[in-house]
């Protein structure tokens, strides 16, 4: 028996374009004092990232696709990261070999480092009632003449559209060579996508411009609602004002509700309650106005 442990030092959330790093440890847990202890041999191990798409059968009707063989023979050495998963694999990275022909004595363990850039052309992680996009790091290993064993590590991916690229991608070539700064420069390069994302979020969420919305019903105008910006950070207070002085109808009660709406393309509808769009929106619903 061999134990496999995967650890992501950065945590389970990444931006698209960031480098995902994972330490993978293979251990032979048998004690060398045990009478049945023996060395364990793995033929190979590899790892890769894949994104799995799943749609609710009761809500979404996806176009038919050709049948795919998902059967893996015991002697097959081809890694299929989505084997046994529900839904469709919409994105996967090339597999990277961690080792070949690894022998572990009783009580011995070895750790390998896996790194891969999270693809920028994939969808963000999402768990809705109609559809789900789930990212996983799949680690596969196999003994000779034995089936492949898989370890799946889920993580989340955030996609920021419009994030600027670095102005000088070739700065590594023109930078002065200094062996004493190698580790510092390497760590600085790893944080660049995150720094650019934070800068973009700060700029976007700091823009203030009043947005006016007229609230009306069949009998006329009820009130005017003003919100000072439409993009917010998580945890930030949303401040708006209601102006009833210009209303034609008195209002007795105000209730505001935030709702996360996931909309599906009309051609994939099963129930008519879905609207024709393919975006995920955050909308503010103003309801329960009771005119006198």
Image (cartoon, rainbow, N blue to C red):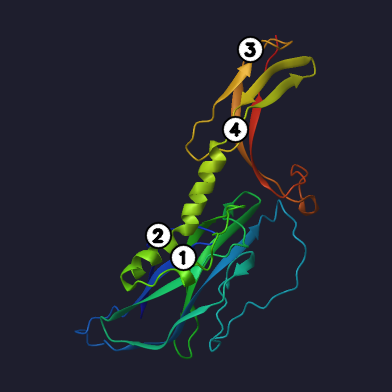
Label 4 belongs to which residue? 229
The Cα–Cα distance between marks 1 and 3, rounded to whole angstroms, is 53 Å
- Examine the rendered structure and indicate whether residue 275 appears above or below residue 227: below
Q: Is residue 182 left or right of residue 193?
A: left
Circle 3 residues within 10 Å: few <14, some 14–19, many ≥20:
few
Q: Which mark is residue 10?
A: 2
Earlier sequence position, callout 4 versus callout 3: 4
Residue 287 in sight in this render: yes
Q: Is residue 64 left or right of residue 20?
A: right
Classify mark 3: helix, strand or loop. Answer: loop
Earlier sequence position, callout 1 versus callout 3: 1
Classify mark 2: helix, strand or loop. Answer: loop
The Cα–Cα distance between marks 4 and 2, rounded to whole angstroms, is 32 Å
Q: Which mark is residue 252?
A: 3
Q: Which mark is residue 20?
A: 1
The Cα–Cα distance between marks 1 and 2, rounded to whole angstroms, is 8 Å
Classify mark 1: helix, strand or loop. Answer: strand
**Residue 51 figure quarter:** bottom right
Circle 2 residues within 10 Å: few <14, some 14–19, many ≥20:
few
Across and down, in percent, residue 132 comes to 61, 55
Q: Nearer the viewer, mark 1 or mark 3?
A: 1
């Amino acid at each position: 028996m061999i134990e496999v442990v995967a650890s992501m030092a950065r945590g389970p959330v990444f931006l698209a374009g960031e480098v995902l790093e994972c330490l993978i440890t293979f251990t032979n847990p048998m004690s060398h004092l045990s009478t049945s202890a023996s060395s364990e041999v793995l033929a190979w191990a590899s790892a890769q990232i894949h994104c799995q798409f799943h749609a609710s059968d009761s809500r979404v009707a996806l176009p038919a696709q050709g049948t795919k063989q998902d059967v893996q023979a015991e002697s097959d050495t081809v890694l299929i990261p989505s084997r046994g998963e529900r839904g469709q694999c919409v994105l996967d990275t090339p597999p990277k070999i961690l080792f070949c022909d690894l022998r572990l004595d009783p009580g011995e363990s070895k750790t390998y480092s896996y790194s891969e850039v999270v693809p920028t052309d994939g969808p963000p992680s999402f768990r809705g009632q109609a559809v789900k996009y789930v990212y996983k790091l799949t680690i596969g290993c196999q003994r000779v003449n034995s089936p492949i064993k898989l370890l799946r590590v889920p993580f989340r991916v955030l996609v920021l559209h419009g994030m600027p690229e670095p102005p000088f991608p070739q700065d590594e070539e023109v930078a002065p060579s200094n062996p004493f700064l190698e580790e510092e420069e390497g760590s600085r390069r790893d944080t660049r996508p995150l720094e650019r994302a934070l800068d973009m979020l700060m700029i976007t969420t700091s823009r203030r411009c009043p947005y006016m919305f007229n609230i009306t019903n069949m009998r006329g105008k009820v009130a005017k609602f003003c919100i000072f910006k439409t993009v917010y950070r998580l945890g930030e207070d949303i401040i708006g004002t209601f102006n009833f002085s210009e209303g034609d109808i008195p209002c007795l009660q105000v209730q505001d509700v935030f709702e996360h709406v996931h909309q599906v393309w009309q051609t994939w509808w099963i129930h008519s309650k879905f609207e024709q769009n393919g975006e995920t929106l955050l909308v503010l619903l103003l309801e329960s106005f009771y005119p006198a």
